[in-house]
Amino acid sequence: MGELRPLAEDLTPESRALATALRELFEGLKVSVRRYAARRVRDAGTFSRYLNGTRIPPWEVVTDLFTDVAEHRGVAATPEAIELVRRLHRAAVETSASPRHAVEVLEQQLADADRDSRRSTARGDALGDALLDRKHRIADLEVRLSQLEAEWSAERERADRLAAANPDVTALLRERDLLQGEVARLSADLHAAHKQRTEAEERCALLERQMEALEQTQPAPTTLPTASSQAMPKVLIVDDQPDNLLAMTAVLCTLDQELVAVPSGQEALKALLDHDDFAVIIMDVQMPDMDGYETAAHIKRRPRNRDVPIIFLTAMGTDPEHSARGYAAGAVDYIGKPFDPWVLRAKVAVFTGIYLERRLSGDR
């Protein structure tokens, strides 16, 4: 573990380029892998796999390496060098299909959602304290004003004298009105913080379920004897975000379908021209150039593809306005992100079963 392992032989060009750049950085430290791993409190075996290209490190590992090399040499890395390695890292991530890397991506998303939840909780507590303070001050002012008004109604002459002796009554009223305005603003901020925390907690729960699904999923042999003489149906996955394609592919990879993942609506239309045995299409709504609704409209205009069911997957929410537009575009279902992995697997299995039944009966 003290020496660098040779680069793995079956690396993609992107992974090999990233590993080569990381090795050049590491060699500038002039220490063993085991010693550097101990310095950064990391597993030496894992760090060695980062350097031979069999694992893609989190970006934090790369930034730590830049920091340590700069400290050793006494010269900070240039922004151009950092940007070059960042592009190599992004390219390696986008071309990696490792289920373990999918788990790491989800772990990072889970950490982000958990951080949002904790920040929202802390902000909500602070806003709650400020709101309670303003309410107490308003209550105190109300008591003081009530006392003055009671004295005025009980004895008008005395009230006049009190008015003369207390010229700050108007100022008290103005202060109360200002505080009431602050209470309204703080109440709105508190509600927004609670909503943000609730959404972050929901993202945490779904991301944890996605991680559990990926970690528990095991490859299984095809168990449909009636399809043994024919190729299994395909599932078309359309999303412009590489992380989303990676997560959905990892969740569905153990089903009996062949998965075809493409990054745009144009690529989806091309795939449908090349193949006519898709059982279902899973499509993101928000994509550049051609969004999911427009892509679905093109698909439904083609006689050979119009009967392929489309499931929309979107981060815009499942409120009636968006879901109604999805169904109008020809979708059979509409699922919000982050998605529940077991729900997605179940829906894909249902439409694949329907496809196989139709094919065996001679309808397709």
Image (cartoon, helix red, strand yellow):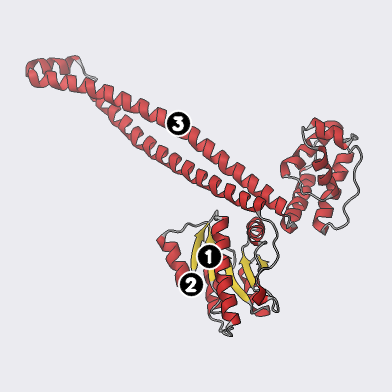
Query: Pointer 1: what residue?
Result: 312
Q: Quadrant of the N terminus?
A: top right
Q: Is residue 75 visible?
A: no
> Which sits earlier in the primary sequence, circle 1 or circle 2?
1
Residue 50: where, in percent of width, then height? 81, 45
Question: Label 1 sits on what residue type?
Answer: Phe
Amino acid type, callout 2:
Ala
Identify which residue, 65 or 55, lies in the foreground. Answer: 55
Q: Nearer the viewer, mark 3 or mark 1?
A: 1
- Name the quarter where the C terminus is drawn: bottom right
Pick whichever of labels 3 and 1 is earlier in the sequence: 3
Instruction: Answer with mark 3 or mark 2, whichever residue precedes in sequence.
Output: 3
Does any portion of residue 190 appear in the rendered image? Answer: yes
SS assignment at label 2: loop
Quadrant hosting residue 320: bottom left
- Write down the residue under mark 2: 329
Q: Quadrant of residue 253?
A: bottom right
Q: Relative to the observer, which residue lies in front, 252 or 207? A: 252
Measure the alpha-carbon separation of dots 3 and 2.
44 Å
Label 1 with label 2: CB-CB less than 8 Å: yes
The 10 Å Cα crowd at callout 1, few under 14, some 14 to 19, many 20 or more, is many
* Front residue (pair 206, 65): 206
Badge 3: residue crowd in 10 Å (few <14, some 14–19, many ≥20): some
- Which mark is drawn over residue 216? none
Q: Pick the residue in front: 357 or 85.
A: 357
Query: Which label belongs to residue 125?
Result: 3
Mark 1 and mark 2: Cα distance apart in space: 10 Å
Q: Position of residue 271 (x, y in %)?
A: 66, 74
Residue at the (38%, 40%) spot, across then down: 188
